[in-house]
Amino acid sequence: MRLVVQEAAFDLGAEANAFAAAVQGAGAVVTFTGLVRDNGGALDAMEIEHYPGMTERAIGAIMDEALGRWSLVDALVIHRFGVLKGGEPIMMVATAAPHRADAFAAAEYLMDYLKSRAPFWKKEIGAGGEDWVKAKEADEDALKRW
Amino acid sequence: MRLVVQEAAFDLGAEANAFAAAVQGAGAVVTFTGLVRDNGGALDAMEIEHYPGMTERAIGAIMDEALGRWSLVDALVIHRFGVLKGGEPIMMVATAAPHRADAFAAAEYLMDYLKSRAPFWKKEIGAGGEDWVKAKEADEDALKRW
Amino acid sequence: MIDILYFAWLRERIGTNREQVETQAATVADLVAELEARSEGHGLAFADKTSLRVALDQELADFAAPLSGVREVAFFPPMTGG
Amino acid sequence: MIDILYFAWLRERIGTNREQVETQAATVADLVAELEARSEGHGLAFADKTSLRVALDQELADFAAPLSGVREVAFFPPMTGG
């Protein structure tokens, strides 16, 4: 299990390859990558604020929970903070399991919890000014399925 | 949308990066990669047979169905045939969507249909001989949720 | 003449991946009845009908499907892709 | 003395990301009542309680939670990670 919170960009492909190469006995690897949507050119940048210390603690707890609930071989979470441009990867999750159902479920679980329970806040910066992204009810509702 | 059926190995990371770089307006990219499980060293190789012509046609139909059902920006399926060693990638699926729920659902849908409706047959080759992999009832059942 | 294709253990039991047959069979089920009489291997291959899948001109079909106009019939076990 | 941390638009409205306060507040709700009286910015930041989340020593908590033994209290809007 690896957890990285960093300002620097990361290489999705390199991370996916390293993750897949290290897993023993896995038949299924799922990755999720969140990208900055440019909203049809209306967005200049996205700024992500986080709560150093609590971020690592919250993500670690979410990952431990996932590793306990599903038959996983390994899991990875990378999440950036700072200023990101449209199209850049914000974060990624990877899960490896003997079978695909566990890998998919754990990746979706990690995403649902990261969205609403890890202390990150996004601000969209565009021609029209700056706006804190509002939490979506759908994201809070998504937690109820687990 | 891209569909590749090939004997050669592919590079998961390079494919994931190329896919993510090409999508416009996507906020979510999901990849699934199927690896040859070595079953604790009992497996020497896996041989995958397919039905040239029908394979491309069946996968194309499954992808069209997915693109119609979910709000996707793009989708990719790569599936190998021939002789593969333990740990090697067998196939991958990638989906890109504005939001994560669509990307996850479409990737799971593609996998469920590829498992049971694309004309591939796996044979496990090990110290104990050769064995055609039996279709699992769970895989057939998985189709019922869509 | 219809092209008959066999895959996986059907191919192994029958000993060939393709044969051409002259048939008046109206449906897939009729064709199977003809094919399984061709050899011991054919009989073995077609013994368990629940493990048999069929495609007509590369589209999955069922055993009641008519054969008129069909040029390629493929028989194989349940698929195990992905 | 308790460390109070603010994030996102709470931080912007209050004008600082951290302050230390001397308080006898028994619960988070009591502390909020004290804090919102500190300045116009504080009042604005704490106005909408439904948009307010709190963490005690870096663990999410609710507004009825007791403060005894707590060293760091963070206030922030609903999280928008991922």
Image (spheres, coloured by chain):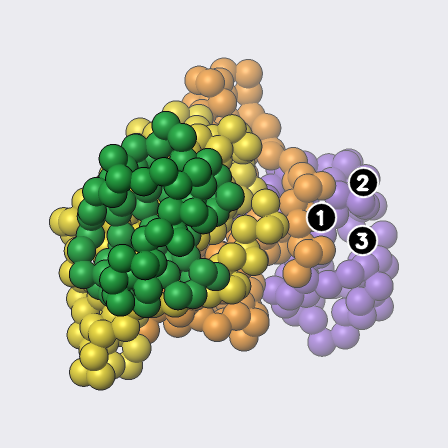
Chain colours: A yellow, B orange, C purple, D green
To the question of a shared chain for discs 3 and 1, the answer is: no
Q: Dot 2: within a 10 Å radius of its alpha carbon, few (fewer than 14), some, or many (20 or more) residues?
A: few
Residue B141 disc label:
1
Subunit ID for the residue under disc 1:
B
Q: Quadrant of residue C45?
A: top right
Position in image of residue D43 (x %, y %): 33, 64
Q: Foreground: C41 or A94?
A: A94
Q: Which residue is mark 2?
A: C48
Q: Quadrant of residue C51?
A: top right
Q: Which residue is mark 3?
A: C32
Residue A83 disc label:
none
Q: Residue at x 34, y 58 (%)?
A: D36
Quadrant for the N terminus of chain A in the image: top left
Subunit ID for the residue under disc 3:
C
Residue D74 in view (yes/no): yes
Q: Secondary structure at mark 2?
A: loop
Between the C-alphas of marks 3 and 1, the distance is 27 Å
Position in image of residue B9 (x %, y %): 31, 44
Q: Secondary structure at mark 1?
A: helix
Q: Residue at x 44, y 38 (%)?
A: D26
Position in image of residue B81 (x %, y %): 44, 46
Subunit ID for the residue under disc 2:
C
